[in-house]
Image (cartoon, rainbow, N blue to C red):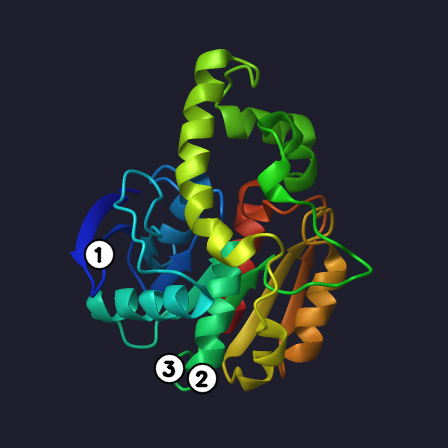
Amino acid sequence: MTILLKTIKTHHVPVQYYEGGEGQPLVFLHSAGGITGDDPFLQKLAEKYHVYAPLLPGYGDSEECADLRDMLDITLHTADVIDALGLKDPILAGHSMGGMIAAELAAIAPHDVSRLALICPSGLWLDDHPMPDLFSLMPYEMPQYLFHDVEAGTALMTAGVAIDDSEWLKAYLIRNARQMGMAGKILFPIPDRGLSQRLYRIKAKTVLVWGDSDRLTVPAYAHAFKKAITGAELVSIAEAGHYVTLEKGDQVVAAIGRLG
């Protein structure tokens, strides 16, 4: 499946986005780790949907944007992107940080989002289940929080390059600094921006997708989201971690399919 990188202009900044596939339009919002056109999950989505996956400013080689300062700015920017794409009520899906943004948009504009897929979303904070500080972790520490199969997850993250390779590490740290500069506006020091107080406003048909082995946003967060969003359905996926999109991508696509 061919997925192309394109650019559109929004109010604040040009936005790069990946587009591919046919079928119902689906907007996919990426995690703090970003996304590329050859991402296996994006490929799976494009086999069933006409997928649009915008990059937040600062991700990939996209232009950074100082005007996006907080959760509201980023949420409204996402609405602007959907408008610029000419889409009316697409399926809205988001993973991790992207799930947080998708949930915020569905809460702020409940009549504009009718189908919502939240895949291990961030955005809540449970004192009994504190989330690890992503901003303090080194690359070699990340896979244990992100994957059920840590060894296979490490290979996916590094594309077979040794994780302590100096050139790979340098490129990773440079890329990560740009990306986390944007992500930190809503995730640092904790990802609580009051979303829990707004989830009741969501009217969309909602499916929550969670890896049973998620050690970043542990399954207790799944139940907190389910309790807060009226009628939300929870799909738990065995032998999958936070990156359930990569470990069990077919099952995630099938879960999204429950939205109709």
* Circle 1: residue type: Val
Element at badge 3? loop
- Pointers 2 and 3 in contact (CB under 8 A)? yes
Q: Which mark is residue 205?
A: none
* 54 vs 20, nearest the viewer: 54
The answer to whether one can see residue 118 in this image is yes
Q: Disc 2 marks which amino acid?
A: Pro
Name the residue that disc number 3 marks. 112
- Crowd around label 3: few <14 · some 14–19 · many ≥20 (10 Å): some
Q: Which residue is mark 2?
A: 110
How many labels, in total? 3
Residue 174, quarter of the rendered image? top left
- Give percent across and percent down for residue 172: 46, 27
- Provide residue 195's location: percent of width, then percent of height: 58, 72
Q: Please tell me which of labels 1 and 2 falls first in the chain.
A: 1
Whether the residues at callouts 1 and 3 have beta carbons within 8 Å, the answer is: no
How many neighbours does mark 2 have within 10 angstroms: few (below 14), some (14-19), or many (20 or more)? Answer: some
User: Which of pointers 1 and 2 indicates the residue nearer the eye?
Assistant: 1
Amino acid type shown at disc 3: Asp
